[in-house]
C-alpha cells in the first residue's frame, strides 16, 4: 500500500517522498555545478562553435530520452523502480571524472552523453515512484515539491560553482571534482532510504495481468507500442502540446551565450542560472503549497506564456536588464509547467502503465529537444553572423512557444466541450 501523507504537511509525513526529493535535491546541486560552466568551457576553452555545441546538447539529450523510455517500461514490467534509480546514480558518479580530462569534441560528447544516459535511466522510474508513493489527490503537490527542491539544489550548485570559478581563477576542473560530493551523498540516500511501493492491489492491473504478460514476451519496443494503446486521449493531447513546447525549450547554454553578448563576466554566468533556478524553485514551491487540486491545460497555457515572454525579452532590440527579466520568466515557466505536466501524466495514466506513460513523455521530448537545440543553434549562428548576437535562438523559441500555447488552448476547449457533453448526457 502506498504511503499516506497529510495535505497540511506533505514534506514531513512521507518518508519515501522525502528520500526521493532530498536525493533529487543533491543531484540537482551536482548537475548544475558542471553544466552551469560546461557550455562556456566548450566554447571558450575548447573553441567549439555554437552550432557544434547545439549538436552536442541535442545529441546527448537523445541518449537520455532513449534511456528514459526503456527504464520506465522495464520498471512497469518488473514492478521495480529503485534498482533503476540506483543504477543511474552509480553510472553518473563513474562518468564525472571524465569531464576533468575532456579536451575535444568527442571526449566531451562521450562524457556528457553517458552522464545524460545515467540521468535518463533513473528519470522515468523516479517520476513513477512519486505517484506510487502518494494519494492521487496529492499528485500536483508532490511533483511541485520535487520540482521546487530540485531547482533549489540547482541554486545552491550554481552559487558553489560561481564561488569556485571566481576564487580559483576559472578552474573548470576543480568544479568538476567538487561536484562528486553531492552525487555520492544522493546515491547513499537512495540506497538506504528509498523503497519500492508499486500498487499491486490496483483492480485494473489485476484484470489486465494476463494480457500484459503476453506482451512482456514480445520485443521491448513492440511491447511498449502495444501498451501505449491503452493510454487515454487526454494523455495524447498533452503529448502533442509537449512536443511543440519542447521545440522551444532548448539548452540553457544559449542563455549563457546571450549573457555574454551583453558582456557578463564568465564568473557571473552561474549567477544567471541561480536566478533562473531560484525563480523555478519559488514558483514550484508555491504550487505545492496550494490546497486546490485543479490542474488542466488552461493552467498549463498560462505557464507556457511565461516562456513566450522570456523569449520575447531576448530578441535583438532588448537591453541588458532584459536578460534578468527573461531568466525570471523562464524559471517561473519551468516551476509551473513541470509540476503540472508530471501531475497530469500521473492522473491520466493507469497505475500499471505509469512508468510507460512517463517513458512516452520522454520519447516525445527526446525527439523534440534535439530538433529544438539544432534549430536554436542554427538560428544563433545566423544571427551572430548578421550582428544580432545569439538572439536568433530566442526568435525560434518564441515561435515554438506561441504554437504550443495555441495548441494548448485548442485542446483545452475541446476537452471542456467533451466533458460538458458527457455531463449533460448523464443528467438527461
Image (cartoon, rainbow, N blue to C red):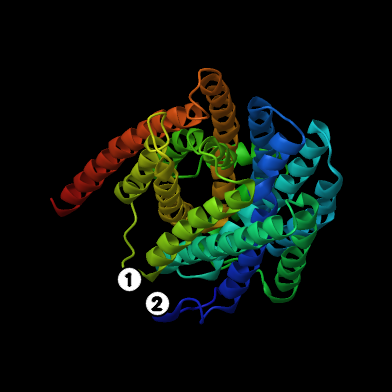
Q: Position of residue 123 (x, y in %)?
A: 63, 53
Rendered position, 278 above or below 170: below
Horizontal placement of 214 versus 131: left or right?
right
Q: CA distance from mark 1 to mark 2?
A: 8 Å
Rendered position, 350 above or below 312: below
- Residue at x 60%, y 64% (from the top left corner): 156
Quarter-of-image position of residue 195: bottom right
Check residue 251 in the rendering and tell me which mark sits there, or answer none.
Answer: none
Horizontal placement of 241 versus 224: left or right?
left
Q: Position of residue 140 (x, y in %)?
A: 42, 62
Is residue 280 visible to the viewer in this orientation of the structure?
A: yes
Q: Position of residue 307 (x, y in %)?
A: 40, 42
Sequence-wise first label, 1 or 2 = 2
What residue would you read off at disc 2? 7
Image quarter (top left, top right, bottom left or bottom right) of the N terminus: bottom right
Quarter-of-image position of residue 160: bottom right
The one nearer the camera, 128 or 122, is 122
| SS label for mark 1 | loop
Horizontal placement of 418 versus 387: left or right?
left
What residue would you read off at disc 1? 291
The one nearer the camera, 56 or 176, is 176
Is residue 136 visible to the viewer in this orientation of the structure?
A: no
| SS label for mark 2 | helix
Judge the density around disc 1: few (<14), some (14-19), many (≥20) Cα neighbours within 10 Å.
few
- Residue at x 69%, y 76% (from the top left corner): 193
**Looking at this rendering, what residue extends furthest in the left direction?**
428
Verify CB contact (< 8 Å) between mark 1 and mark 2.
yes
Quarter-of-image position of residue 85: bottom right
Q: Position of residue 101 (x, y in %)?
A: 86, 45
- Residue at x 72%, y 30% (from the top left corner): 48
Amino acid at each position: 500500500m502506498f504511503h499516506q501523507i497529510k495535505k497540511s504537511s506533505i514534506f514531513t509525513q512521507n518518508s519515501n517522498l522525502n528520500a526521493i526529493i532530498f536525493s533529487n535535491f543533491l543531484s540537482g546541486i551536482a548537475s548544475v555545478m558542471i553544466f552551469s560552466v560546461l557550455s562556456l568551457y566548450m566554447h571558450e576553452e575548447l573553441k567549439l562553435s555554437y552550432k557544434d555545441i547545439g549538436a552536442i546538447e541535442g545529441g546527448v539529450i537523445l541518449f537520455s530520452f532513449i534511456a528514459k523510455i526503456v527504464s520506465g517500461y522495464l520498471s512497469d514490467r518488473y514492478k521495480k523502480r529503485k534498482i533503476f534509480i540506483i543504477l543511474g546514480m552509480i553510472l553518473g558518479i563513474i562518468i564525472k571524472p571524465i569531464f576533468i580530462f575532456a579536451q575535444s569534441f568527442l571526449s566531451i560528447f562521450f562524457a556528457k552523453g553517458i552522464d545524460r544516459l545515467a540521468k535518463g535511466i533513473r528519470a522515468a522510474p523516479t517520476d513513477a515512484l512519486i505517484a506510487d508513493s502518494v494519494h492521487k489527490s496529492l499528485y500536483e503537490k508532490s511533483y511541485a515539491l520535487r520540482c521546487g527542491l530540485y531547482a533549489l539544489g540547482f541554486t545552491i550548485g550554481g552559487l558553489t560553482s560561481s564561488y569556485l570559478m571566481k576564487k580559483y581563477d576559472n578552474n573548470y576542473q576543480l568544479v568538476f571534482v567538487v561536484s562528486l560530493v553531492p552525487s555520492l551523498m544522493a546515491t547513499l540516500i537512495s540506497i538506504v532510504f528509498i523503497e519500492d511501493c508499486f500498487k499491486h492491489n490496483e483492480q485494473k492491473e489485476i484484470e489486465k495481468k494476463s494480457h500484459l504478460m503476453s506482451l512482456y514476451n514480445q520485443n521491448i519496443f513492440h511491447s511498449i507500442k502495444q501498451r501505449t494503446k491503452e493510454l487515454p486521449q487526454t494523455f495524447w493531447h498533452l503529448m502533442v502540446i509537449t512536443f511543440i513546447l519542447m521545440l522551444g525549450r532548448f539548452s540553457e547554454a544559449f542563455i549563457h551565450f546571450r549573457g555574454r553578448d551583453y558582456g557578463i563576466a564568465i564568473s557571473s554566468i552561474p549567477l544567471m542560472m541561480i536566478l533562473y533556478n531560484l525563480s523555478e524553485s519559488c514558483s514550484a514551491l508555491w504550487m505545492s503549497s496550494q490546497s486546490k487540486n485543479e490542474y488542466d491545460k488552461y493552467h498549463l497555457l498560462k505557464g507556457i506564456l511565461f516562456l513566450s515572454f522570456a523569449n520575447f525579452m531576448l530578441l535583438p532590440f532588448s537591453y541588458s536588464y532584459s536578460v534578468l527579466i527573461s531568466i525570471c520568466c523562464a524559471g517561473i515557466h519551468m516551476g509551473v509547467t513541470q509540476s503540472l505536466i508530471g501531475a497530469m501524466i500521473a492522473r491520466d495514466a493507469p497505475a500499471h502503465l505509469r512508468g510507460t506513460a512517463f517513458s512516452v513523455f520522454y520519447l516525445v521530448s527526446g525527439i523534440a529537444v534535439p530538433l529544438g537545440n539544432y534549430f536554436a543553434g542554427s538560428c544563433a549562428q545566423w544571427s551572430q553572423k548578421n550582428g544580432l548576437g545569439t538572439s536568433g535562438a530566442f526568435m525560434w523559441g518564441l515561435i515554438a512557444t506561441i504554437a504550443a500555447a495555441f495548441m494548448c488552448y485548442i485542446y483545452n476547449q475541446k476537452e471542456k466541450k467533451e466533458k460538458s457533453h458527457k455531463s449533460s448526457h448523464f443528467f438527461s
